[in-house]
């Protein structure tokens, strides 16, 4: 789904610049129209073809108290005490990405939809381990980086209760808790509004939750809704799961297109993996789309699985350097 956006700004240079940026960088999200006169602005608003309008004070004065179902944003560099409480203000001179994030988030929250269904859907790969400390997150990010190298738009989503994302990505305040706290509105658009692209790797990601309960209290049905929304508009969705086996992990195993199981050389990890294979019926469910990722010296058999990935040891303590180095090894044997 694309948001139908109307621009009514008297400053022609700014209006044209904004329009050019949106058509170049946000063509998947916005269908942009530009009005140069107040009369044309009003007739376009009345046409019922617009979802959102960005307008300066001259166009808003022409609009007055005219009834409309279009979400209106005032864009200006100064506050206006006479502005209607139904019109949201946006600072004019700031990054276009910040302006668009605000527009998308506000529209998504009040559009009335839950999950958009008209985007292309990503391949969903869940990365899981029956034991902690196996290098699961490193493997997940290595696979995500490999997908980016293959020119795929890739989103990394951590469902760990205690996240280590700050070791890999910048944390600038757009926490995924904005979505998890309510799960209302068009969640697909909300996720687009807060996801960020890591400059160093090209991986899209969400900033870590503000509180561990935001992930811990998710029901499996809510988790599925979150996955469905995140899978919109990208080619690959890499889901980093908690090292447990609970209803959320079980549901993910049912819906994922591929399951990466990460095991290292520790006896505990290998024992837990053998227990899962022999005692849990979900192994038979996933083994034809499961890949065993042998990490940190592990050498295990994967004959009855879809494939096997062998990761070498990397001699560095920099977690970012580790996953980037391992990305070239994410090849199925």
Image (cartoon, grey):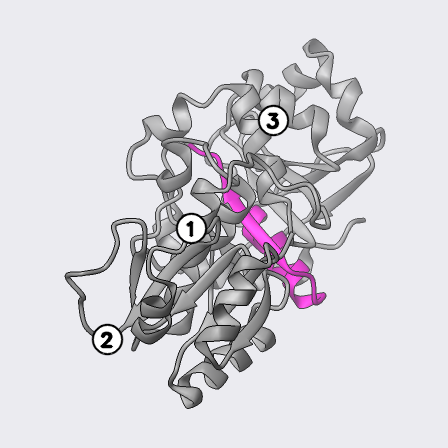
Q: Nearer the viewer, mark 3 or mark 2?
A: 2
Identify which residue is drawn at 59% across, 33% down.
Answer: 128
Which comes sooner in the sequence, label 1 or label 3?
Answer: 1
Which comes sooner in the sequence, label 2 or label 1?
Answer: 1
Q: Secondary structure at mark 3?
A: helix
Q: Secondary structure at mark 2?
A: loop
Q: Secondary structure at mark 1?
A: loop
Quadrant in the rendering for residue 327:
bottom right
Q: Nearer the viewer, mark 1 or mark 3?
A: 1
Q: Kindly identify which residue carries mark 1.
A: 67
Q: Report the magenta residues as a range.
A: 140-160
Residue 50 place in picture, x, y as percent: 56, 58
* Spatial CA span between label 3 and label 2: 60 Å
Find residue 270 and name its label. Answer: 3
Using a 10 Å C-alpha cutoff, classify the residue at mark 3 as few (fewer than 14 neighbours), some (14 to 19) or many (20 or more).
Answer: some
Q: Work out whether residue 79 can be spotted.
A: yes
Farthest residue, direction left: 81
Q: Nearer the viewer, residue 266 or 331?
A: 331
Q: Is residue 60 above or below residue 110?
A: below
Q: Nearer the viewer, residue 153 or 65?
A: 65
* Spatial CA span between label 2 and label 1: 25 Å
Q: Kindly identify which residue carries mark 2.
A: 77
Identify which residue is drawn at 83% across, 30% down.
Answer: 288
């Amino acid at each position: 789904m694309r948001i139908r956006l109307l621009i009514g700004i008297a400053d022609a240079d700014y209006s044209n610049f904004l329009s050019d940026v949106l058509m170049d960088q946000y063509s998947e999200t916005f269908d942009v129209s530009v009005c140069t006169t107040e009369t044309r602005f009003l007739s376009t608003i009345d046409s019922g073809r617009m979802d959102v309008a960005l307008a300066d004070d001259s166009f808003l004065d022409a609009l007055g108290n005219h009834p409309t179902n279009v979400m209106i944003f005032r864009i200006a560099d100064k506050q206006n005490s006479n502005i209607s409480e139904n019109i949201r203000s946006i600072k004019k001179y700031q990054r276009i990405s910040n302006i668009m994030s605000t527009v998308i988030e506000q529209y998504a929250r009040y559009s009335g939809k839950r999950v958009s269904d008209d985007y292309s859907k990503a391949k969903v790969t869940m990365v899981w381990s029956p034991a902690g400390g196996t290098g699961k997150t490193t493997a997940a990010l290595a696979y995500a980086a490999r997908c980016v190298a293959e020119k795929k738009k890739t989103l990394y989503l951590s469902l760990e209760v205690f996240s280590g994302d700050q070791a890999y990505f910048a944390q600038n305040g757009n926490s995924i808790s904005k979505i998890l706290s309510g799960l209302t509105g068009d969640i697909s658009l909300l996720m687009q509004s807060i996801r960020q692209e890591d400059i160093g790797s090209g991986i899209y990601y969400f900033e870590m939750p503000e509180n561990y309960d935001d992930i811990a209290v998710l029901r499996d049905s809510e988790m599925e809704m979150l996955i469905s929304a995140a899978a919109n508009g990208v080619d690959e969705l890499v889901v980093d799961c908690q090292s447990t086996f609970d209803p959320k992990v079980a549901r993910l195993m049912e819906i994922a297109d591929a399951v990466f199981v990460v095991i290292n050389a520790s006896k505990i990890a290998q024992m837990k993996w053998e227990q899962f294979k022999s005692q849990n019926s979900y192994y038979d469910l996933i083994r034809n789309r499961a890949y065993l990722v042998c990490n940190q010296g592990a050498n295990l058999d994967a004959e009855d699985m879809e494939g096997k990935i062998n990761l070498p040891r990397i001699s560095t303590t920099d977690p970012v350097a580790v996953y980037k180095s391992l990305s070239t090894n994410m090849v199925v044997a």
